[in-house]
Image (cartoon, rainbow, N blue to C red):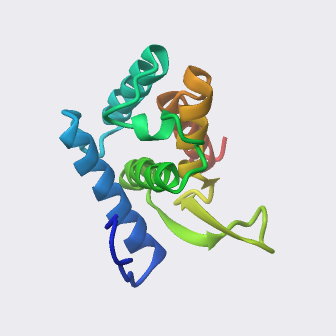
Amino acid sequence: MNEGKPASFASVDEAMKEAAAFAVADAAAEGLVLDYSWSSVQQLEAAFDRLFDEKQQPGLLGRLIGKKPPASRRSTRYAYAYGGYLAEVVRRRHAGEWGRHSRMQPEQEKLTFTTGAGIEMWPHERIMKRALNGPEDNLYDYLCALDRMISERSHGA
């Protein structure tokens, strides 16, 4: 996520993988290891907890909770980066792909990650909700619920 000239990507998938890689590097700069494992989302959630509870502004994800409105360009970039990371965690466990349209709102362009089981998700929006609402929008709980839904679909439950 270059702050200068916009990058050119062959696909939405490629762009979001690059965004996820940016989140990994950003987290590493703050001493947090994100390795695309399910358990790494617990670490990410713990970072959000510290920020929300302590109202810290600098450092990891503070850019989402900072004094500027959450819809600022910078916070949106970070939401897409960390949302890309969440989707990549899901992709590595269940497959899936990014697209520009949702089956739920086909008439409008909406960046959507669709799991291999056909479940649509908007992880960048989930990141913003977590930053704004706190623990009630827990990221790890969200992924666990998604995991159960995918498993139920896959096994015909």
Q: In the rendered view of the protein, which quadrant contains the N terminus?
A: bottom left
Q: Which of the 4 image quarters holds residue 68?
A: top right
Q: Looking at the image, is 106 positioned above or below residue 145?
A: below
Is 125 left, or right, of 80 in this rendering? right
Name the residue at the top extreme.
Answer: 53
Q: Residue at x 23, y 50 (%)?
A: 25
Q: Residue at x 67, y 40 (%)?
A: 157
Task: Depth check: give the residue in front, 150 or 64.
Answer: 64
Q: Position of residue 70 (x, y in %)?
A: 58, 43
Is 84 left, or right, of 72 in this rendering? left
Q: Position of residue 135 (x, y in %)?
A: 55, 21
Task: Depth check: give the residue in front, 58 or 23.
Answer: 58
Q: How many marks?
A: 0
Q: Which of the 4 image quarters holds residue 15?
A: bottom left
Q: Looking at the image, is 146 positioned above or below residue 42?
A: below
Q: Residue at x 65, y 47 (%)?
A: 156
Q: Position of residue 5 (x, y in %)?
A: 34, 78
Task: Depth check: give the residue in front, 152 or 137.
Answer: 137
Q: Looking at the image, is 94 positioned above or below residue 35?
A: below
Name the residue at the front extreme.
Answer: 67
Q: Which of the 4 image quarters holds residue 56?
A: top left
Q: Position of residue 124 (x, y in %)?
A: 54, 51
